Image (cartoon, helix red, strand yellow):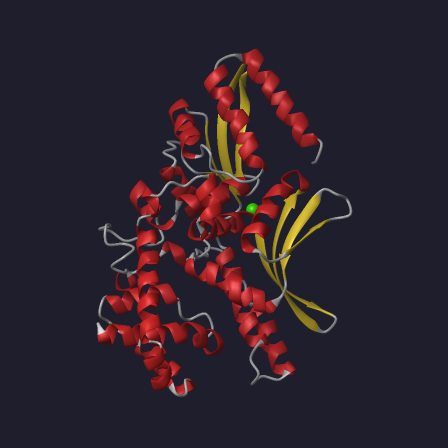
Amino acid sequence: MELLLIIFYDLVILDKLSSYSNIALLNPTRCEEVLLLGSNCSSFKNNGRKNVTNMETIRLNNRKKSLNIIHQRLNVGHLISHYTTLTINKNSLSENKEIFHQWLVGFTDGEGTFSIVRQNEKWNLTFKISQSTYNLRVLNYIKKQLKVGNINIEKNKKICNFRIRDRSILFNIIFPIFDKYPLLTSKKFDYDNFKKAYFILSDSKLNSIEKDNFIFKLLNELKPIEYISSAWRIPLDTVGAFRFSNFESLVDNTISNFENASKVMSKPWLIGFTEAEGSFYLVAKSKDRLVHAFEITQKKDKIVLLAIKYILHINTKVQYKKSGYYTIVTTNSRAIENIIKYYGNTMKGIKSLEYRIWARAYIKHKGNFMALNHIREKVRIMRKKYI
Ligand SMILES: [Ca+2]
């Protein structure tokens, strides 16, 4: 126990230190898991030691405190490993930060951007989420939950943006969320570069020419065409006792069933992603027959749609459309019923209203062309006001 305490305390300090010295290398959660399994993170430890003065004193004074930290951390680990048994609904999305953070990563995978822009001889780092003003409420929700950031509505009144530019807020609030719950789409590539840019800009050992050179070099790196987020790879040696002990096989850049899909994709993430990218609609099968449809499309990241297919029990294949995107779509009654159940009382933005109208129409009016057609028109008018 004594040894564990020390190791843990080292890590607590390292969480802070490593962020300054060691770009993007340390995933605190992962490292913690590895340690608990008995291996070591010695390279990180040594780096830390060099930088910490008076470590012994700090350590003694904080033994008690670190016990509490361990306690909290174990609880967090426990929470993550069993999140699937937690109720995920509108309330837990607002009250449980871990759930909200996963939702936010999902929404960002759909609609967020991490940009590195040069303006007036200066570098700007911006985390931004843009929406049609039709869904302004979702940005208000995000701002309220994070307690930081700014919202603006563009001149045409059609688009609104949530933005964080303040570097210390990026470092203290945004990075910890996206490090703990990695992006699942190829936006992970942009995020990694964004974070690298942050550390280059904060490095006091570099002069401004060196900083410029490093960042231009970073921006010149092209995203590989077949890029897949590292979240889809869980190698054996980093599988922690907490998160993955219930699973026998590992995820290795392929998804072929519900089990390995749900190892990587959590329900809060999928709710967030669906709010950004999902469509609940009615489609004409013939001139007097309307049926319920659910669809998610993506330009890249077929693996994300594959996982969604398995999690929502959709039997159709992920298709590649000639116009250049992947899509998973279903009108199958059993799949639609699963989807109605899965998203019940979950979403926070305008899509929750669209979902409710859609789900109610299924339950009350399935097969009734007149009633469904009327509902479809009403939703169209509702949207048109904004878009
Ligand atoms: Ca998108």
- In this view of the protein, which residue sits in the foreground, 12 or 342? 12
Residue 209 appears at what percent x and percent y? 64, 82
Does residue 147 lie above or below 3 as drawn?
Answer: above
Q: Residue at x 49, y 44 (%)?
A: 273
- In this view of the protein, which residue sits in the foreground, 365 or 324? 365
Q: Residue at x 54, y 23 (%)?
A: 283
Q: Residue at x 46, y 41 (%)?
A: 91
Residue 269 appears at what percent x and percent y? 44, 47
Place residue 65 in its image quadrant: bottom left
Does residue 133 lie above or below 1 as drawn?
Answer: above
Q: Residue at the right extreme? A: 155
Residue 157 appears at what percent x and percent y? 75, 43
- In this view of the protein, which residue sits in the foreground, 145 or 199? 145
Q: Quadrant of the C terminus?
A: top right
Q: Is residue 283 left or right of residue 49?
A: right
Q: Quadrant of the N terminus?
A: bottom left
Q: Is residue 369 something that shows in the picture?
A: yes
- In this view of the protein, which residue sits in the foreground, 327 or 245? 245
Q: Is residue 288 left or right of residue 85?
A: right
